[in-house]
Image (cartoon, coloured by chain):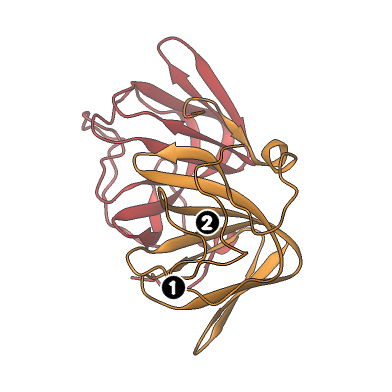
Chain colours: A orange, B red
Amino acid sequence: MQKQAKINFDQKFKEIDDYWSPRIVAQMNNYEFKIAKIKGDFIWHTHRDTDETFIVLDGNMTIKFRDKEVFLQKGEMFVVPAGVEHKPEAKGECKILIVEPKGIRNTGEVKNHFTSENGIWV
Amino acid sequence: MQKQAKINFDQKFKEIDDYWSPRIVAQMNNYEFKIAKIKGDFIWHTHRDTDETFIVLDGNMTIKFRDKEVFLQKGEMFVVPAGVEHKPEAKGECKILIVEPKGIRNTGEVKNHFTSENGIWV
């Protein structure tokens, strides 16, 4: 646990190669801060019991919903409400910070090749 | 509540003039994301029951502890553990994002002119 070390996002991103593989950089109470590089299409999924926060640190992404889409650039954030189906996408490489309760599965109720292992720190 | 709107930090900061006056930009479950402009010295204080997250969006700041200090620049974050006395400072203007449970008093156990009203959104 690196709870009491400061986190430099640029340095932490150097330790990540794979897209769509969130890695924990900090824990606050029972919440985790995770960074991820994303590119291309993720899958439609839902987190039934929790909101999920996306903060764009570099690049841009779109969060698709069944009835709208939200385009996010560097310096923007969005909270996806619990129970709302969504699909993150990024045309180019995008670097994001995710905030959510500890142990949430990145693919929600779905389990497939996009499902990443939890609990991995960088 | 602007829970389902996207947040652009630069735009939100235009609505803030006062230093050390955190304003809510988003809520995730029972946690709040607050932005603040800070400059000068804050006071020593403790949040007994919760960790507190600082993310520097622009400028730089120092979080002093009784036994060390942590210098944070743009693109860096730090989680102050619950129960640990600390004192934020910034030589020049610094823009930060704070994440903590809803309703936390910014001055911890202290109540003085630095204590800002909770529940104000921008």
Work out which quarter of the rendered image holds the C terminus of chain B and state it. Answer: bottom left
Q: Is residue B9 visible?
A: no
- Foreground: disc 2 or disc 1: 1
Specify the amino acid type for callout 1: Thr
In this rendering, is residue B88 above or below A113?
Answer: above
- In space, the residues marked 2 and 1 are separated at their CA atoms by 31 Å
Give the residue number, with chain letter if any, for mark 2. Answer: B13
Q: Nearer the viewer, residue B118 or B3?
A: B3
Chain letter of the residue carrying label 1: A
- Residue A98 in picture, x, y percent from top left: 53, 54
Tell me if residue A67 comes above or below residue A6 in the rendering: below
Can you tell which quarter of the image residue A74 is in? bottom right
Chain ID of residue with mark 2: B
Q: Residue at x 21, y 32 (%)?
A: B111
Q: Pick whichever, B75 or A89, lies toward us.
A: A89
The secondary element bearing badge 1 is classed as loop
Residue under label 1, please give it: A46
